[in-house]
Image (spheres, grey):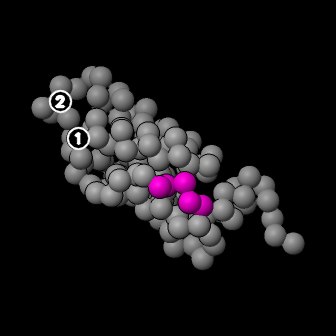
């Protein structure tokens, strides 16, 4: 998996790509939390951050309440929080708009 270093460029949509990799890869819960925290901290996309926060809440619950040996390495993709984050990131990646425009429009900006 790629590092989350350099995720602040709003033109390349790397935050969406990295988030999808983190969600789809077979990772430990701890590793997934760390990687999503890096994207969360680097992102200027408030909607993405809210979606990530929701998944982080779920992952933290798992980390605190399940022994490491039985923690899932693959996320339940049918979980609505995970599904919403996947949907948002996939739509962001397939959009013809640059990430800065996606962020601006989610904050109410509209082109003339």
- Comes first in the chain, label 1 or label 2: 1
Q: Position of residue 27 (x, y in %)?
A: 24, 46
Residue 77, position as x, y percentages in the image = 34, 52
Can you see residue 110? yes
Image x and y of residue 49, in percent: 55, 44
Relative placement, left or right, of 31 versus 82 is left
Find the magenta span and give its range: 6-10
Disc tally is 2
Q: Quadrant of the C terminus?
A: bottom right
Q: Quadrant of the N terminus?
A: bottom left
| Residue sitting at x 29%, y 28% | 63
Q: Is residue 110 above or below residue 50?
A: below
Residue at 47% from the left image edge and 61% from the top image edge? 14
Q: Tell me the residue that label 1 is attached to.
A: 28
Q: Is residue 30 magenta?
A: no
- Disc 2, SS: helix
Determine the residue located farthest toward the top in the rendered image. Answer: 65
Left/right placement of residue 28 relative to residue 5 reads left
Q: Residue at x 17, y 30 (%)?
A: 68
Residue identifier under label 2: 68
Element class at badge 1: loop
Q: Position of residue 18 (x, y in %)?
A: 41, 57
Verify CB contact (< 8 Å) between mark 1 and mark 2: yes
Q: How far apart are the two marked residues, 1 and 2, measured between alpha carbons?
A: 8 Å
How many residues crowd mark 1 within 10 Å: few (<14), some (14–19), many (20+)? some
């Amino acid at each position: 998996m790629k590092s989350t270093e350099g995720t602040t460029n709003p033109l390349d949509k790397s935050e969406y790509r990295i988030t999808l990799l983190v969600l789809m890869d077979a990772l430990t819960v701890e590793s997934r939390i760390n990687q999503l925290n890096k994207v969360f901290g680097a992102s200027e996309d408030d909607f993405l951050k809210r979606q990530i926060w929701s998944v982080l809440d779920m992952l933290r619950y798992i980390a605190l309440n399940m022994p490491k040996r039985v923690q899932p390495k693959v996320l339940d993709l049918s979980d609505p929080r995970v599904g919403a984050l996947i949907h948002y990131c996939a739509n962001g990646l397939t959009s013809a708009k640059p990430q800065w425009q996606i962020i601006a429009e989610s904050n109410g900006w509209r082109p003339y």
